Each structure stands twice: as structure tokens, then as C-alpha cells.
Amino acid sequence: MSNRRPSIVLAAVLAGGLALSACATTPMGGVTSGASTEFSADAFAWSTRAGQAAIEGRVAFVQDGKTFQCVGNVGLIPDTGYTRARMQRLYGSTERAAVPAAVVRARSAGEQGADYRSYERAQPCADGAFRFTGLPDGSWFLISPVKAGDDIVVVMKRVQTRGGRMINVTLGS
């Protein structure tokens, strides 16, 4: 009996270790590979937590020799499978883009989830600068309309907050 018991214990430990090694770790915030592109409030939950991270930035966009100025607000949107699919559809990228506002409006964005807007944050773009505070660590999309004369472009950039620190961002570069 004493020879058999260590074998059973060893088998149980190995089985438990194999089961744990099959578990994937999930990042603190933002999209994970294989994330659903369907709207789910659960996918946004991480972004509603209070945190110590901050994003301080400025909008600086130049195209064809024209300097664009930000108009209105800078938007901050949590990176989820749903929003990542939206960014790809609207801007043709999930990293950074500058697309004429008329093109963005014309592209089909699909249906927004009923509570999608409640997860967006916005700050005024005052003198080309903006700031978001109290953020949890995670991946986010920054979006802002910019204007030069009659030309309006929407600039987008994905950013990552980590370790509860402030990051400095130039949106439009």
C-alpha cells in the first residue's frame, strides 16, 4: 500500500500541473487573441475600473503641407474584439490611421451594441492638448477629428497604459 500511495499522489500532482498549464493567462485589459467581434458588456468591464494610469497628449497632424487643428473632443475607446473590428472597418487599421471624415461616415460600421457609448470617454482638445486620468491598465483607441480649411480628417491611434503610469502620446503622427 505504501508503494502505491506515492504513485497516486504523483499522478494527481502531474494531472493538476497539466491542467494548470493548459490555462491561458489573460491580460489586465484590452483585447485577447480570438476575442469575439460581437458586442459584449463583459468584454468592456475591465475599462470601467478605476486606475492610476493616465494619457496626456497632443494632436499634431500635417498632410500635403497643411497643418490640421483638432476640433471638438478627443475620444478614448476601450480595445475589445468588438471595437477592434470596428476600427478595422472604419479606418482600415487597428494601430493608427488618418481618414477623411466623409469616408469614415460612408463606411458601414455595423450595429453598435446598446451600451457601447457608455464605455467611451471624451475630453476637450484645448489648444491641441488633451488628458485622460484615472484609467486602468489596458489597450485603448484614441480618436479625434482634425480640420484644415474645409478638409476634415479623423485621426486614430491605439495606445497601451501599463503599470499605472502616465503615457505621452502624439495623435496624428
Image: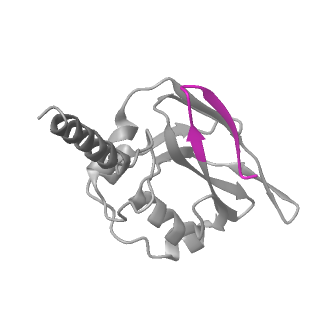
Residue projecting furthest to the top: 52
Side (left or right) of 42 relative to 166: left
Asked if 68 appears above or below 106 in the picture, the reply is: above
Side (left or right) of 167 relative to 33: right
Give the residue drawn at x 45%, y 59%: 33
Give the residue drawn at x 75%, y 60%: 149
39 or 64: nearer the viewer: 39
Asked if 131 appears above or below 158 in the picture, the reply is: above
Give the residue drawn at x 62%, y 27%: 166
Task: Find residue 93 and report its image quarter.
Answer: bottom right
Q: Which residues are magenta?
A: 159-173
Asked if 67 appears above or below 119 in the picture, the reply is: below
Could you tell me what secondary structure mostly forms the magenta stretch? strand
95 or 149: nearer the viewer: 95
Q: How is the image coloured?
A: one colour
Counting every numbered tag in the picture gives: 0
Position of residue 41 measured from the top left corner of the image (x, y, whole percent): 27, 50
Side (left or right) of 116 relative to 141: left
Give the residue drawn at x 56%, y 33%: 162
The stretch drawn in magenta includes residue 160: yes
Residue projecting furthest to the left: 1
154 or 84: nearer the viewer: 84
The stretch drawn in magenta includes residue 5: no
Locate the N terminus by quadrant: top left
Position of residue 154 measured from the top left corner of the image (x, y, whole percent): 62, 59
Position of residue 148 measured from the top left corner of the image (x, y, whole percent): 75, 58
Position of residue 150 measured from the top left corner of the image (x, y, whole percent): 71, 64
